[in-house]
Image (cartoon, grey):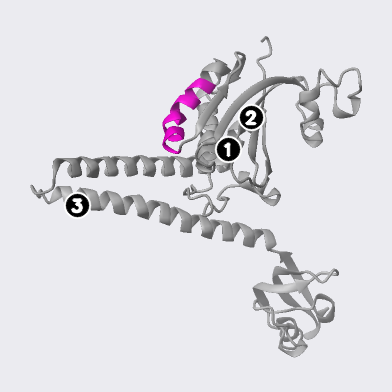
């Protein structure tokens, strides 16, 4: 067994047979519970394990060892994500709190020599950072609710035009501040949806697009109706032009489309930023995941927004995904079912 799994320590240094915990169990009868050592697969790839080595005894004599082990690769990934999240949140909390404390501390001194404009600016800084803290706490609470399955939706009949207009209005000031032109092409259709949650999703996507776009570029939000029937393998020359919007969608997505809801809405949020690496297109929707924004000059968030968006869209029986080309920008897609009697 020792030669088969090429047992090594946490640091990657191989055990000699005589110094390994399994050897000690076999010869001394001691039970070992070890976390973080490595075993090796048949393809020579190493993986972290948690294992217990227990002696097999027959009339007091040790005749073998049972080794029960788990591959803890996924557990270590989750733990690393938690550590990174704590680090990010600590930074995100510390920065605005320091700013608020500084501003309020100066105001509390009652120094009459501080000009009125500077006092007003201090109040504005404290207020802005307070809002930032509230958004961060709200995101953290949303992620916790998602994990516990307690994100409740208040669904009602709503018009997509109104939702897109409100989301755009909320983000227009941010777009102007960054020198971004915001272009919106709405469609008047009815949805059975939680209006606040869909607006939250759209504003999050618009905010990301604006933050990661160069000044002078355009962020576009548009929508179209599409049919998910026939399936991709049924497309032919006679119906291709009618279904050209469908042909651009991922085949896997179409094959998994909800039954009984062939007509859907496809909302797109497009930017002209630096793009997202292909290896990150799925990962960005995971909690705590964020792109390195150092090249854009814009500060990233906590990596919670897209995870919340995905949960909201899934609870509307929809899909969310992204496509991107480095240096040419990114497009985020939302696919939602139309109201049945629309």
> Mark 2, mark 3: which one is toward the viewer?
2
Residue under numbered circle 1? 149
Q: Upstream in the sequence, badge 3 or badge 1? A: 3
> Mark 2, mark 1: which one is toward the viewer?
2
Check the image and name the residue furthest to the front: 216
Taking the magenta stretch, the answer to whether it contains residue 4 is no
Say whether residue 325 is visible.
yes
Q: Nearer the viewer, residue 265 or 148?
A: 265
Local packing at callout 1 (Cα closer than 10 Å; few below 14, some 14-19, many 20+) is few
Q: Nearer the viewer, residue 60 or 123?
A: 123
Name the residue located 41 percent from the left edge and 36 percent from the top edge: 177
Please, what secondary structure does the residue beneath circle 3 have?
helix
Name the residue located 88 percent from the left edge and 24 percent from the top edge: 235
Please, what secondary structure does the residue beneath circle 2 have?
strand
Image vertical order of residue 114 relative to residue 53, above or below: above
Q: On the image, which quarter does residue 94 sit in?
A: bottom left
Give the residues drawn in magenta, as a range: 164-178
Image vertical order of residue 20 relative to residue 80, above or below: below
Q: Upstream in the sequence, badge 2 or badge 1? A: 1
Q: On the image, which quarter does residue 82 sit in?
A: bottom right
Asked whether, in this view, residue 198 is left or right of residue 92, the answer is right
Cβ–Cβ below 8 Å for labels 2 and 1? no
Residue under numbered circle 3? 105
Distance from Cα at disc 3 to Cα at disc 1: 41 Å
Q: On residue 178, which mark appears?
A: none
Name the residue located 69 percent from the left edge and 62 percent from the top edge: 73
């Amino acid at each position: 067994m020792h030669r088969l799994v090429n047992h090594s320590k946490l640091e990657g240094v191989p055990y000699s047979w005589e110094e390994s915990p399994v050897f000690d169990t076999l010869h001394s009868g001691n039970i070992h519970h070890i976390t973080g050592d490595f075993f090796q697969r048949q393809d020579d790839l190493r993986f972290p394990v948690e294992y217990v080595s227990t002696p097999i005894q027959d009339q007091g004599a040790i005749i073998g060892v049972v080794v029960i082990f788990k591959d803890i690769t996924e557990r270590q990934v989750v733990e690393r994500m938690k550590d990174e999240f704590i680090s990010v949140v600590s930074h995100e909390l510390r920065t605005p709190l320091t700013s608020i404390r500084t501003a309020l501390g100066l105001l509390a001194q009652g120094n009459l020599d501080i000009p009125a404009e500077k006092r007003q600016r201090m109040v504005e800084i404290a207020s802005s950072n307070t809002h930032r803290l509230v958004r961060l706490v709200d995101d953290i609470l949303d992620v916790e609710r998602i994990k516990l399955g307690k994100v409740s939706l208040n669904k009602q009949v709503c018009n997509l035009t109104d939702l897109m207009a409100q989301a755009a209005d909320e983000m227009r000031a941010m777009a102007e501040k960054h020198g971004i032109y915001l272009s919106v092409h709405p469609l008047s259709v009815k949805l059975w949806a939680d209006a606040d949650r869909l607006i939250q999703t759209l504003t999050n996507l618009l905010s990301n697009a604006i933050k990661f776009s160069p000044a002078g570029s355009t962020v576009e939000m548009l929508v179209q109706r599409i049919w998910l029937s026939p399936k991709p393998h049924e497309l032919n020359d006679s119906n291709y032009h009618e279904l050209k919007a469908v042909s651009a969608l991922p085949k896997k997505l179409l094959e998994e489309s909800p039954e009984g809801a062939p007509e859907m809405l496809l909302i797109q949020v497009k930017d002209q930023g630096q793009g997202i690496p292909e290896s990150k297109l799925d990962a960005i929707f995971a909690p705590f995941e964020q792109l390195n924004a150092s090249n854009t000059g814009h500060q990233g968030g906590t990596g919670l927004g897209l995870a919340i968006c995905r949960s909201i869209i899934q609870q509307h029986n929809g899909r969310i995904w992204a496509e991107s080309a480095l240096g040419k920008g990114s497009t985020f897609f939302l696919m939602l079912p139309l109201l049945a009697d629309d």
